Image (tube, rainbow, N blue to C red):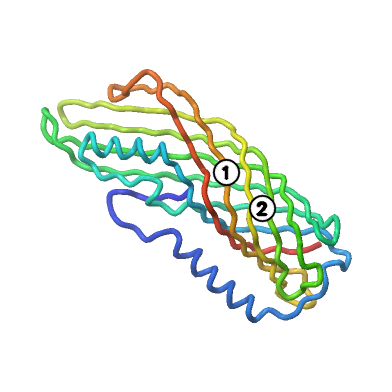
Amino acid sequence: MSVRGQSSPQPSLAAPLVSLLVAAALLVALAPAARAADDGKPYYFTFYLQQSWPKQTATNAQIQQINQMFGANFDDWSDVANLNVGLQLFKRVSPHWKLGLQLDYSQGAIEGHTTVPTEAGDAQLSFEQRYSIYIDLYLVAHYLPCVSCTRVVPFVYLGGGVGYEKDRTTLTLGNQYFSQGLQVDNSGSFPTFSAGVGIDVPLSSTKPWYLELGVAYVWARMTNTVPATGELAPAPTVTADTDFTGPNVWIGFGTRF
């Protein structure tokens, strides 16, 4: 997830990742031919930065309902670039296959503040949806279609595992004469799956360091019925629909050992 305020424009979090991808493309073009990967170093450890575009269809619709009800213009998750960090540990178990584990972590929020008219005069309306944690653990595999490639090593990525997230949505409305609110807490685990393609680019013919670039699609969704509290709650319980399904891209740096 990413952190972004909604009441004023801010630069997209995509910009730093785009710069990294451009630099990575230059490294790919300039990378020397590397030694073969069967030199007694079968393990691969990668740290990466990933940008995702989750659907969040139901959540975005709920935010737009708030906008229509109060005449606000709060951002939803379609306005935000979502970043997370991750780690991978692989072992090359055959010429064509690497198997391992992947861990992703992120947190963040969207929020906004605006003034709206009420029967008791102008009032401050504030909205926030904060993910205090998102984490997933995958079993992953890389299929290597070109075992003779050394300068650029393509792979097909497959993974499946379990994710966990915890979030809180709050809405407050008030001025000197009244104060009303809404709070919804949601958390839980869910299955998640992913498939994509990528490349490893060895950075030296003598050192085990490499650059990794990839693109994938994720299928992950959690739907809960959770309590809603406060004067602005539409009902005692509401449906919290968290949909992380969507594409992502990543850039990583790793080593073999």
Look at label 2 and name its amino acid: Leu
Residue located 48% across and 51% down the image:
53
Look at label 1 and name its amino acid: Trp
The residue beneath circle 1 is 219
Quadrant of residue 238 in the image? top left
Position of residue 23 measured from the top left corner of the image (x, y, whole percent): 55, 74
- Mark 1 / mark 2, whichever is N-terminal: 2
Residue located 80% across and 56% down the image:
97
- Look at the picture and state if 70 lies above or below 255: above
- In-image side of 22 versus 89 (left or right): left
Residue located 40% across and 37% down the image:
59
Residue located 56% across and 40% down the image:
220
- In-image side of 114 versus 129 (left or right): left
Q: Nearer the viewer, residue 85 or 35?
A: 35
- Look at the picture and state if 200 lies above or below 45: below
The residue beneath circle 2 is 87
Residue closest to the far front:
145
- Judged from the image, the secondary structure of the residue bearing numbered disc 1 is strand
